Image: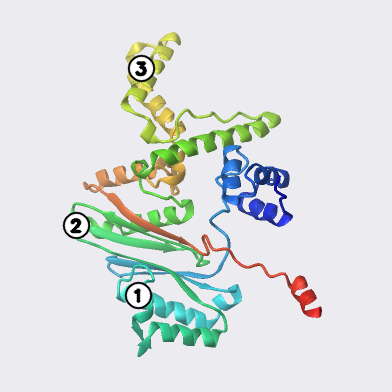
Amino acid sequence: MQEISAKLVKQLRDRTDAGIMECKNALKECSGNIEEAIEYLRKKGLSKAAKKADRIAAEGVIALQVADDFSKATLIEVNSETDFVAKNEAFQELVVNVLDLAFRRAINGTEGLMQLNIQNQTFEDYLKQKIAIIGENIVIRRISTIVCKPNQIVNGYLHHNKKIGAIVLLEYTNTQNGQNLKDLAKFLSMQVASMKPKVISYKELDSELIAKERVAIAAELEKENEELKRLGKPLNRIPEYVSRTELSESVLNAKKEELRNKLKQEGKPEAIWDKILPGQIERFILDNTILDQRLTLLAQLYTLDDKKTVEQVLVEKSKEINDCIKVVCFKNFELGEGIEKKIDNFAAEVAAQMK
């Protein structure tokens, strides 16, 4: 059997938050393959969505610019090697200039950026000059610009620490309503930044992903139930389904019939069934769409009113202003997401130099 090093165990633990022995056993089961070990731990309920897997720290800032008329918005990520340099005036000036260039030229992605002109020189030369002055490697990592079409409005949110930012594009039908939606677009940007949805709707989720996540979610809840049982607290219900995609008309009709029979057995008057059933079905859907709530914007509970989903908020706002409001797209940047930052071992470095 392959020998599992302490370094490999630590890497897996850092990425999953699982215990040392669980990590070691997972690596043994997966012949030292760290990606397979992450999935192994998820299926065992020992890793909560491998929450650190894509969020390894890196330094720098996220920056945002939104047009005064909310017709365009740009979000960028600029990385530095240290947090100290990220606070440097020269670095901050670079960020401002990159954001201005990206916003004016409506740039999406960093491809071709180096050949654009800035301050009477190519961006490539400008960046090299700044790197020489600042003394650290600087990377323009991500750029996303949204430009509105007719009957659209975009707004964004940048967290005060400049490490998280998001932009959301809304579409509406009544041309008079555009400016009435700028606050909603900003609030939804805050939602995206804080709750980190991956897609807008459950309709965008892949069936293979749903099947895999159903196993992981069940294992996660069962693992939590072990501790809840020890503490004498109510246990999590293990859902039969995890996405609205799985709740077909036949599934919902069968559930309604089951609930009607239960109401009958409980002796509830048939005249009030239609008043009780909608709430029970809504609860059933909520309990069986955990994956949607985690990954899709519309199914998430609204951060400003957690008694409603984002979808319900959009429906209510649409009725309020006699319109039909839709989320067209969103972008969310978290500083250093997916970047593995080098960890310096100064003691080893000094020892090596003493040899």
Total marks shown come to 3
Residue plotted at (22% across, 48% down): 323
| Circle nearer the N terminus (1, 3) | 1
Label 3 crowd bin: few (<14), some (14–19), many (20+), radius 10 Å: some
Residue plotted at (70% across, 30% down): 230
- Figure check: 313 above or below 153: above
Residue at the spot of label 2 = 176
Which quadrant would residue 135 be assigned to in this image?
A: bottom right
Indicate which label's residue lies in the foreground, 1 or 3: 1
Q: Looking at the picture, how far across and down is residue 98, in whole percent? A: 40, 77
Residue at the spot of label 1 = 112
| Circle nearer the N terminus (1, 2) | 1
Is label 3 in a helix, a strand or a loop?
Answer: helix
Residue type at mark 3: give it.
Trp
Determine the CA span between mark 1 and mark 2: 38 Å
Determine the CA span between mark 1 and mark 3: 63 Å
Residue 273, disc: 3
77 and 326: which is toward the camera: 77
Going by the picture, which residue comes out furthest to the right? 355
Residue type at mark 1: give it.
Gly
Q: Looking at the picture, how far across and down is residue 252, in whole percent? A: 35, 24
Residue 21, disc: none
40 and 199: which is toward the camera: 40
Label 2 crowd bin: few (<14), some (14–19), many (20+), radius 10 Å: few
Label 1 crowd bin: few (<14), some (14–19), many (20+), radius 10 Å: few
